[in-house]
Amino acid sequence: MDLRGTMRITGDGRLEIGGCTCDRLAREFGTPLYVMDEDEIRARCREMAGVLSRAYPDTFVAYASKAFSTLAMCRLVHQEGLGLDVASGGELYTALQAGFPPERILFHGNNKSVEEVEMGVRAGVLRFVVDNMHELDILEDVARRFRRRVHVQIRLTPGIEAHTHDYIRTGQLDSKFGLGIANGQAMAAARRVLASELLVLEGLHCHIGSQILAVEPFGVAAALVMDFASEVKKETGYTVREVNLGGGLGVRYKSGDERVPLGKYASMISKIVREKCLAHGLEMPRLMVEPGRYIVGEAGTTLYTVGAIKEIPGVRKYVAVDGGLADNPRVALYQASYEAVVATRALSPPEEKVSIAGRHCESGDMLIWDILLPRLRPGDLLAVLSTGAYNYSMSSNYNRYPKPAVIFVKAGMADVVVARETYQDVAARDRIPARFEFADDASSCVGTAGTA
């Protein structure tokens, strides 16, 4: 098993993260529990900014907050000097509440509402990443009413089939995201923005998918975006000032996974941008990237307590834990694979193959299929690794379970950054119509089923 971040195993076999043993965290905060390694997050922020700026000095790194968004995370990103990518009014609100400077925020979304656009314009976000012509209509109307010019990037669909799950491929032509280069939609959008007195075309954007573990697709994307920038200049005379290659860098979910060497990634995309500028006679643009999973994916660990154990002789042994689909839907959505360790017996050798099941009323509520672990008992503490990206952010109250707490750990300190929900929290927004109130006569509430 490959340890992540500040993880280590103590001499007595306990898993430790950020100087805190997992059994201590479980006793103090309960389970399920999202544990985020603060030093690992900060290290990835610094690595990304440093490596990219050395390869291409005029670089802007924006953390993609859809991967994991809380007030504390937005504050951390600001402290590390990165920009922020938001994809909804809720993510923008969280960023602003955390004191994140709006002039360093990129606003995404394939169907932004009028209210969200107004919120972004009022706040003064750095860029709107435009996904379709309808959004341009909204932006122009809001800009006119607010008497402000709005700065935009056009999101392209370059037609690249990244090697990842169908649901997280976004660069191919058949996608709900962006404007196609091949079908002329992207050029039409560029002309539309350039003709507007209220909108300012700053750059081009593309995002080809997520959990990509090879550098080649990013190189192809960079080349296609730069070629399109050349076409824009030829047809309109305008030189785009920014090229945004989005995110998508993968992380290690299992021991066989290998992260893309960040230096190789940075070298490739910067080299292609430079070569294309030279070939097409373009000025060097500002290079933007939007890592999300790369920053937080391996920094997260989810702790669960083992409950029921069910063995079907000759078939499978199920080990149920006190979480599942509601706190990690990625297995059901993407067939994601994870590794786990028994947090109090991390040095014990594996003894049996088991499948880790959730507690929700769905047959597909599985966390890990067929993993070798020490023999498990009810009450054991299980740590599932690399759960920092898209687990908390995609969590739900399915079966009316409260959402787990989120804690940041660092140098032996553990701080709650999202409080654990209670049953009262889950029902707090429910309302009962007046006509549903019980009558004074309790007998009037009794049905007639089963009467003669």
Image: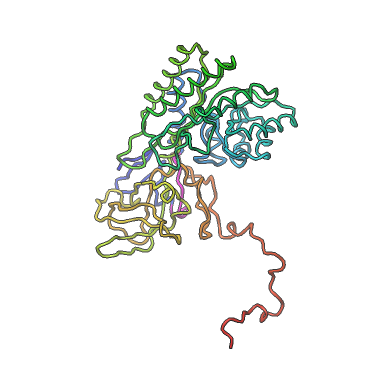
Q: What stretch is highlighted in magenta?
A: 26-37
Say which quadrant the C terminus sits in: bottom right
| Residue occupying the far front of the picture | 183
**Looking at this view, is 7 or 124 the one in front?**
124
Residue shown at the point (72%, 77%) measured from the top left: 440
Residue at 38%, 62% (x, y): give it.
307
Q: Quadrant of residue 381?
A: bottom left
User: Residue 227, percent across and down?
Assistant: 48, 20
Q: Which residue shows up at 59% across the image and 26% down it? A: 188
Using residue 402 as the reference point, say whether residue 217 is left or right of it: left
Residue 257 place in picture, x, y as percent: 33, 38
Q: Residue furthest bottom?
A: 452
Within the image, what quadrant is residue 142 found in? top right
Please state if 407 lies on the left or on the right of 424 as rendered. left
Q: Is residue 33 magenta?
A: yes
Q: Is residue 12 above or below residue 294?
A: below
